[in-house]
Amino acid sequence: VKQSLSARDSADRLAAHLGLTTTGEFKLRKYKDCLIATDEMRQLFGDLVPGDSEEPSHPIVSAFCANYLPSLVNAYMENYCPEGPYHRLLVGILQSSYFAKYFRTPAGSDLYAFYVGNILLSTHEEPLSPFTVGLLILATYAHEYKAYIEPLPDHIVTQLKCWVREQGQKSIDFLRPSLCLMSESEVLAQLSDDPEAEERMSSEFDNHKRNLDMAISILNILDGRLKNEARQLTLTRGHVFERYAQMHKEKVTGRRSECVRCQTVAYCCREHQREDWTNHKERCFKTVY
């Protein structure tokens, strides 16, 4: 499958599995179990996308986003399920430059409002997750890069901070005795009484450590300390421009030459645009939006 299908063919196959179309419409699939459906989607995605399936600029990811992103967003908003395949696939392409282009369209404001609503709804129902971190980065900084978006109101920021601190405190309460209060003999005694305790304790310890790290990251986001990460996730398409601009000995004027076909990448000059074509042509698709 990996060798015989083009990027577009692979994108078409993934879209067909999810009932997505190039017109923005979708044929909603009824799942008996969201987790099983998500696992099936991930399995197909892994079969179709060779190498690092999390790479947001992969040619297959680019082809999929260029043709099916509006349909995926509509399916995600109409059939919201945190564990479902539409939700999880959207998480995986959050940093794609094609998502950036979609987010700059008028539909981007609707998706943004839906994001913020889900953040507030999830604050008492779901644990912290990388997806929550990504959404909060968008929610906190998007107004700096998107003129149609208003900043989060102060009372919502306060509400989010309180929730994150509560989540972080739960992990601190779990980790503190593990790190400070239990002696080595007590740990060994506990493990000898329960052969599976070591694996279970290790898993819980790792989960709470990740949760605490995410809580710290989110508080930094809300306090305005992660603007570089926000700039990446709000997708200003600056990474290629800046990489080539550094090669200029003379001062760069800041004028950008945007790829006319995909409008997902910009260059400091025509020379560097031509130089990058070997890499970009595999990821360059005309979008349906």
Image (cartoon, grey):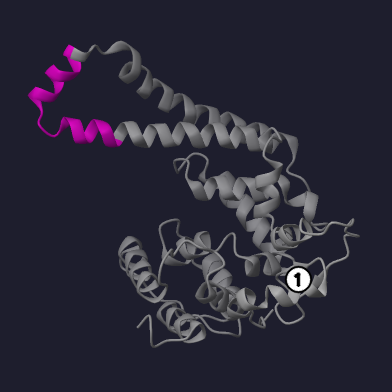
Q: Secondary structure at mark 1?
A: helix
Left or right: where 207 falls relative to 75: left
Residue 188 x, y percent position in the rendering: 15, 19
Quadrant location of the C terminus in the rendered image = bottom right
Residue 112 lies in quadrant: bottom right
Is residue 209 on the magenta stretch?
no
Q: Which residues are magenta?
A: 185-203
Relative to residue 261, is residue 185 depicted above or below? above
Q: How many marks?
A: 1
Q: Which residue is mark 1?
A: 272
Quadrant location of the N terminus in the rendered image = bottom left
Residue 33 x, y percent position in the rendering: 31, 64
Residue, x 79% and y 74% (percent of image)? 271
Residue 163 seen in the figure = no
Work out which residue is located at the far front of the displayed protein and give it: 249
Is residue 189 on the magenta stretch?
yes
Residue, x 54% and y 68% (percent of image)? 78
Secondary structure mostly seen in magenta is helix
Residue 96 x, y percent position in the rendering: 60, 64
